[in-house]
Image (tube, grey):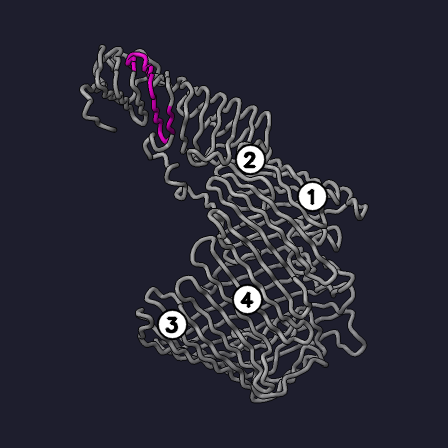
Amino acid sequence: MLHRPARVAALLFLLSGAQLAWAQGLAPAARPRAPATIEAQSIEGVSEFEVTARGSVEFQREDLSVYAEFLRFNQEFGRIEADGGVRLQRGVDRFFGPRLRYNTRDDTGVFEEPTFLMGRVQVARGSAERLEFLGKDHLRLNRASFTTCEPGDKGWVIEAGELDLDYEEEVGTARDMRLRLLDTTIFSFPYATFPLEKRRKSGFLAPQYSQNTRRGLEIGIPYYWNIAPEQDLTVTPLFLSKRGEQLKSNYRYLSKDYAGQFRLEYMPNDDILKRPRSGYTLQHEQQFLPTVTGRLDLNKVSDDRYFVDLASHVRQISLGNVQREGLLTYNDSFYGMPTYLQGRVQRFQTLQDPLSPTLSPYHRVPQINFGTSKTEVAGLFDFTFPGEYVRFAHASLVEGARTSFNPQMSMPFLAPGYFVTPKIGMRHARYDLSRVGPAQPEHQTLNVPYGSVDGGLIFERGTNLFGENLTQTLEPRFFYVYAPYRAQDQIPLFDTTLADFNYAQLFTENRFAGGDRFGDANQVTVAVTSRLVGNGGQELFRATLGQRYHFKNERVGLTPTSPLRGRHQSDLLASIGGRFAQSWTFDNTIQYDPQNARVERAGASVRYAPEIAKVISASYRYNRDPVVPVRQVDLSAQWPVQPGWYAIGRVNYSFLDKRLLEGLAGLEYNAGCWVVRGVFQRVQAATQTSSTGVYFQIEFNGLGQIGSDDTVDFLRRNIPGYARTNPIDAKLVPQSMRPRLPFEQVF
């Protein structure tokens, strides 16, 4: 409350005996509230009935404040009449205008020609020809306009012949509504409803549109149906200028024990292919019991080129394969031993490219995983016992069932500065096969015992670098593995491949990934890592070097004709990475062949991000693989080029193919209360297949967006470190829009 030197009178209305007498004859809803305070240059009248105040008047009652040059207050009926530069504050809402009539008992009244600032959900300001107070949480504005833009900024504004805001029902209604951007009407609608307080509400959403060389101009108007608090449905009819009409829907549900969503896309007739096309995704998770959970992930599309042509939201699990999977999992503890049992059915729909046909993976119908573990058995060793039964099915290849066990026992010795963990295990697998070749047995068994020792040392010392106290570590590590040779050439390959050669794989017992091969081994890995660690525990720098040494040649390969390693040392793996100057991060890895003195694989990346919405990234990938060689560079950036303007771009280029794999260029303009994004993208994942798209979106702070609905997610996927330039956190609203400021600074 302001206290000016010129003020000469003040009046405090207390809940006196007379007021209590009034209350006895009133309904509970009309009972008087807390005391009212009036301060003014002059006050006259009878306090129990009616008073008139003139000159810099201030009226206060609970969260209601009225400022005016003239105010008449009828205490008996709770009526306020205020004229002359009237300012009203009710909770977080503020109003300013020439004339106010208000009833403090039921919070009703009329404000003539007000401007306002509302801050219940999103801070917004506006004006109206007439404002009616229909209760504490209900407003009706005639010939109204509002915006979240700064005073004096005519970026965007909503105009409505009538605007009804019912915060109790959390519903807003607008009639004769127009959305204007830079004094130009870009959208109008005779009648619209919208949710208040961020509550979901049924109704049409903002239009969506984009441009793509395969689909043409794509326009859609989503309809949102709030079925129940735990269910909703979004239906989007789309028109694709090159393909025809399409319908997309997304149904979501949630309860205490389960949740999921179902996406369906249907095109009754593709104008190019002259046939219907469709796709769906069903994802469901459920807690049946405290120890039993289930999950469904079902996906299907109508044809091989569905993703290429329509770029749908149906989830593609992996390149060329669409997954259908069901899981049922049991987790419990028996005698202090964590135990699990999981049933799984998995099938794939393989999408074929006529120019590069692929072999379909095996289906798992079913797969049963089980296992248990125990730590500190007899206070000495840890024990695990995983097992699996899986039946592999295929349309043309060998089929069969695999039953396998892999019991392991380890004895970790841990102490400050060192660790040693010896381990022994047994890989057992039994195969019952069908559709085998002439010389291939139907029943096979594999038993491979193995042992390993993993150990390391950790040395630390304090150091000072660039005036900062740091901890430097030196961490040598060794890992020895022995596994005898067992013939496995007759065993089919259901789910197995050679594991990727990387630093983590140096410290594993098996060089294969999957259950159909276990490599013979008599080898040791030697590695060393050094780090620089800050006082807060953050890693500032890391350098690692590792190599594997073999004491005998390998004999187990993926197939009888697979090349086998014939030398006694592996390629050398090295990596270096970290962060410096708080803005730079880098990571570099290399796989070096010392025998042939050449680099087999390498990757280098660096990122500079001094602040939000300012990021530059660069990476290079090199692989000498004879089947799929790679030499690619990937550059991306988001950077301000002028006040409010941000450039966005990405270039992913293959030097071997001499072509652009993916290119992206765009601009983003942040006008303070609205943002416009325009992005051009070209993708050519295969030599004969390319696609070009244009994405455009206008986002109005506090209101929503029109255009391509997933533009922000699209940019986050393609530009590492991309950030919105208009964060919608209320704490980041411009200072002059904060509701706590005086009226003079707001209007």
What kind of residue is marked 4? Ser
Q: Is residue 87 magenta?
A: yes
Q: Secondary structure at mark 4?
A: strand
Task: Using the rendered view, name the quadrant where residue 551 is placed.
Answer: bottom right
Q: Report x, y in % for residue 315.
A: 64, 52
Circle 3 or circle 4, nearest the eye: 4
Q: Residue at x 66, y 65 (%)?
A: 390
Residue labelled with disc 1? 217
Q: Residue at x 31, y 69 (%)?
A: 468
For mark 1, does the 10 Å Cα neighbourhood hold few (<14), some (14 to 19), or many (20 or more) residues? Answer: some
Residue ranking furthest to the front:
642
Q: Residue at x 45, y 19 (%)?
A: 130
Residue 163 to residue 576: above or below: above
Give the Cα distance between marks 3 and 4: 24 Å
What kind of residue is marked 1? Leu
* Secondary structure mostly taken by the magenta-highlighted segment of the chain: strand
N-term mark: 3 or 4: 3
Residue labelled with disc 4? 619
Judged left or right of residue 254, residue 210 is: right
In this picture, which residue range is highlighted in magenta? 71-96
Q: Secondary structure at mark 3?
A: strand
Give the Cα distance between marks 2 and 1: 34 Å
